[in-house]
Image (cartoon, rainbow, N blue to C red):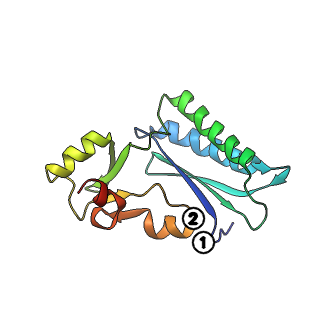
Amino acid sequence: MEFSDQSRVWIYQSNRAFTAEEQHQIVKDLNAFAAGWEAHGAQLKAKGELRYGRFLILLVDEVQATASGCSIDRSAGFIRDIEKQYGVNMFDRFNMAYKKDGEVYSCTREEFEALVQAGEINADTVVFNNMVQTKGELDAKWEVSFKESWHARVFA
């Protein structure tokens, strides 16, 4: 299924990586949720992805039907169920993620700031911009170097 670059995107980041077994089940649940996701009785052209074992990404191509407030609330409920089932936090916007040696790590805002100050996270460290809103932005601006991210302004 092809999705346009204008497709809406929601990214939820776990405060820990999921185990391989958890990932397998989450992908099944994501696929089932996306397949049944509707807005006012109209099937949404939707898909879910799990990236790096910790980012749940929902996409809706609104060519077919527009995601409504109720359908977005339903997706948030689905994510809350994941939180409860796996004992994770998916809604903490101050849970910061970065890449080091090809691995993805996450930490609190305070820990991230300390890593920046210590030089562990530098201008070239890849960070994740979970505020992207479209598939085009996800593809081009989700994984960016620290110096090109909003993080650089906040943690300068």
Give how far across and how far down residue 9 sits, in percent: 58, 58
Give how far across and how far down residue 117 sits, in percent: 16, 50
- The extreme right residue here reads 41
Q: How packed is label 2: few (under 14 Cα within 10 Å), some, or many (20 or more)?
A: many
The residue nearer to you, when weighing 3 against 24, is 3
In the picture provided, is 22 more to the left or to the right than 154? right
Give the residue displayed 47% in from the left and 34% down from the top. 89
Q: Say which quadrant the N terminus sits in.
A: bottom right
Give how far across and how far down residue 85 sits, in percent: 56, 28
Q: List the residue tagged with mark 1.
A: 5
Indicate the secondary structure of the residue bearing disc 1: loop
Q: How packed is label 1: few (under 14 Cα within 10 Å), some, or many (20 or more)?
A: some
In the picture provided, is 57 more to the left or to the right than 69? left
Q: Say which quadrant the C terminus sits in.
A: bottom left
Q: Which picture quadrant has residue 2? A: bottom right
- The extreme left residue here reads 118
Q: List the residue tagged with mark 2.
A: 134
Give the residue displayed 75% in from the left and 59% down from the top. 66
- The amino acid type of the residue labelled 1 equals Asp
Q: Earlier in the sequence, mark 2 or mark 1?
A: 1
Give how far across and how far down residue 32 sits, in percent: 70, 45
The vertical placement of 87 against 104, above or below, is above
Indicate the secondary structure of the residue bearing disc 2: loop
The vertical placement of 85 against 75, above or below, is above
Whether tag 2 and tag 1 are in contact, CB under 8 A, the answer is yes
| Mark seen at residue 151 | none
Give the residue displayed 41% in from the left and 40% down from the top. 17
Give the residue displayed 26% in from the left and 45% down from the top. 112
- The amino acid type of the residue labelled 2 equals Thr
Q: CA distance from mark 2 to mark 1?
A: 6 Å
